[in-house]
Image: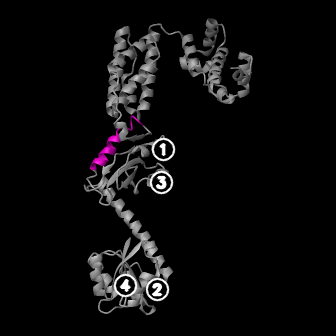
């Protein structure tokens, strides 16, 4: 409730104003009344009202003199000056003094309500601005003190350009106040509440509704204490963005570290897979997991991987007794330019695949047709042609076609159709996808052509096949 003081030498005003409107419904409470400016000033000092309604003309110190004296003492409030038509010049002085407005006698109820409503709106706006200014200084400036008007504080950080409207609305259902601050290209949502409550609801909602967005969620902290630990908490989470890009990162991540496999053992597995020309996906996946389990930071990850790659190259060169062409500087540069861990994983996967192919070629272990078959089974969904595959393997497409027919007894496109038909059967058996969706999944953009090919290979249509299964 905003406190209101009435100062007027007319008893009818002092007694009548409290009765003409529903003050409490508007958020106001009459806390006192005085019949002259001197007594009014004394009550302003004592009661610290938010609004003072004062008559211009009063014995002794008039309303304007009272307002000016209170202002000089640093007493802040909204002033409504009551005046008659003959006092219009005085009313103009009131505006110059910073009084909110003046109100003509006799007082009109609707006009008074309108003024009080504007005062309430302005007070709230001023309070928010002041609160934001204080929070900026406490969180990002040099003010070490906490927030006096709340018990618990929590912070969410998003990119400045993120659309946070729905998130703010959801948070406002759960906490007393949500204040938005912008600082150094980030949007901070400050949550103020009278008590702390479990974070699972906020975390779960953010993960569900704000997927693929970078959101850092701090713990709850005591709002009235130094807020530096709150900012340290956010800074700690921000160091994990490289590892978990475009995700919700909260303190629960810090509490779920797992024991990882020994990285040295996994490096040995990678060496064996490269030398044996075995698939690298599984050992690489387990190798990457060691960084997730330990919540390693960006610089640590990059230096570790850079060292591991150099070690792999050295081990392989020794084991096969061959000079492996490998641009160490190029690999080093690509590792340290990677902006996220998934991007770094892609770089490493490509480099190790190239290293494996080089080793296999050097040891005469590579069979281009076997590689072509393996590549086709892995990329059957794509628009494959011998020309594109020839470019991928650096072979002439006509040569590849002749070699493929000679070793397999069929042309390449027929083999590609066989692979796609086998995959189509698997999908039809184990899913409820529509036929056109199955066609797209196995590489056919034209569903009619897919129908024709399927019936050619299986003697029934896709729908009949599914019905008979």
Above or below residue 79? Residue 232 is: above
The residues colored magenta run 228-244
User: Which quadrant holds residue 294?
Assistant: top left
Q: Percent x, y for residue 104?
A: 45, 87
Q: Secondary structure at mark 3?
A: helix
What separation in Å lies between label 1 and label 2 (alpha carbons)?
52 Å
Residue 174 sits above or below residue 125 on the image: above
Q: Neighbour class for label 3 at 10 Å: few (<14), some, many (≥20)?
A: few
| Residue at image coords 38%, 15% | 271
Tell me which numbered mark, 1 or 4, is placed earlier along the sequence: 4
SS state under label 2: loop
Residue wearing tag 1? 210
Between 306 and 280, which is closer to the camera in this rendering?
A: 280
Report the residue marked by disc 4: 54
Residue 173 in picture, x, y percent from top left: 45, 54
- Give how far apart the Cα atoms at labels 1 and 3 are: 13 Å
Q: Is residue 28 left or right of residue 148?
A: right
User: Between disc 2 and disc 4, whose residue precedes?
Assistant: 4
Judge whether residue 91 can be spotted in this image. Answer: no
Q: Is residue 48 magenta?
A: no
Figure quadrant of residue 318: top left
Q: As rendered, which of 132 and 336 lies closer to the eye?
A: 132
Residue hosting label 2: 107
């Amino acid at each position: 409730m905003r406190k209101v003081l009435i100062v007027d030498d007319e008893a009818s005003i002092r007694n009548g104003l409290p009765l003409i409107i529903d003050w409490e419904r508007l958020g106001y409470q009459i806390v006192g009344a005085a019949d002259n400016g001197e007594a009014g000033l004394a009550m302003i000092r004592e009661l610290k009202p938010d609004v003072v309604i004062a008559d211009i003309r009063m014995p002794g110190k008039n309303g304007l003199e009272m307002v000016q004296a209170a202002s000089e003492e640093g007493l802040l409030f909204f002033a409504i000056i009551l005046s008659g038509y003959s006092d219009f010049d005085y009313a103009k002085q009131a505006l110059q003094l910073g009084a909110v407005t003046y109100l003509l006698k006799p007082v009109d109820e609707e006009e008074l309500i309108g003024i009080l409503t504007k005062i309430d709106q302005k007070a709230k706006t001023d309070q928010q601005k002041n609160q934001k200014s204080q929070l900026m200084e406490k969180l990002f400036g040099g003010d070490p003190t906490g927030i006096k008007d709340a018990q618990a504080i929590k912070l969410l950080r998003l990119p400045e350009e993120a659309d946070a409207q729905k998130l703010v609305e959801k948070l406002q259902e759960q906490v007393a106040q949500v204040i938005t601050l912008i600082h150094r290209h980030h949007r901070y949502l400050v949550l103020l509440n009278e008590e702390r409550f479990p974070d699972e609801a906020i975390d779960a909602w953010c993960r569900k509704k704000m997927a693929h967005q970078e959101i850092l969620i701090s713990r709850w902290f005591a709002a009235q204490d130094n807020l530096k630990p709150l900012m340290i908490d956010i800074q700690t989470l921000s160091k994990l963005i490289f590892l978990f890009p475009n995700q919700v990162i909260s303190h629960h991540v810090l509490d779920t570290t797992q024991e990882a496999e020994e990285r040295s053992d996994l490096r040995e597995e990678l060496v064996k897979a490269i030398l044996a020309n075995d698939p690298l996906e599984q050992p690489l996946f387990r190798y990457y997991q060691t960084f997730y389990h330990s919540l390693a930071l960006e610089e640590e990850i990059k230096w570790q991987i850079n060292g591991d790659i150099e070690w792999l190259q050295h081990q392989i060169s020794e084991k096969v007794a061959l000079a492996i062409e490998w641009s160490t500087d190029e690999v080093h540069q690509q590792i340290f330019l990677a902006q996220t861990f998934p991007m770094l994983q892609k770089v490493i996967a490509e480099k190790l695949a190239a290293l494996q192919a080089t080793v296999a070629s050097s040891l005469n272990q590579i069979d281009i047709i076997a590689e072509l078959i393996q590549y086709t089974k892995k990329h059957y969904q794509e628009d494959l042609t011998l020309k594109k595959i020839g470019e991928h393997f650096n072979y002439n497409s006509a040569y590849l076609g002749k070699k493929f027919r000679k070793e397999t007894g069929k042309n390449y496109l027929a083999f590609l159709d066989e692979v796609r038909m086998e995959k189509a059967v698997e999908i039809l058996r184990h899913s409820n996808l529509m036929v056109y969706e199955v066609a797209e999944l196995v590489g056919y953009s034209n569903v009619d052509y897919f129908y024709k090919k399927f019936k050619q290979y299986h003697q029934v249509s896709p729908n009949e096949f599914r019905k008979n299964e």
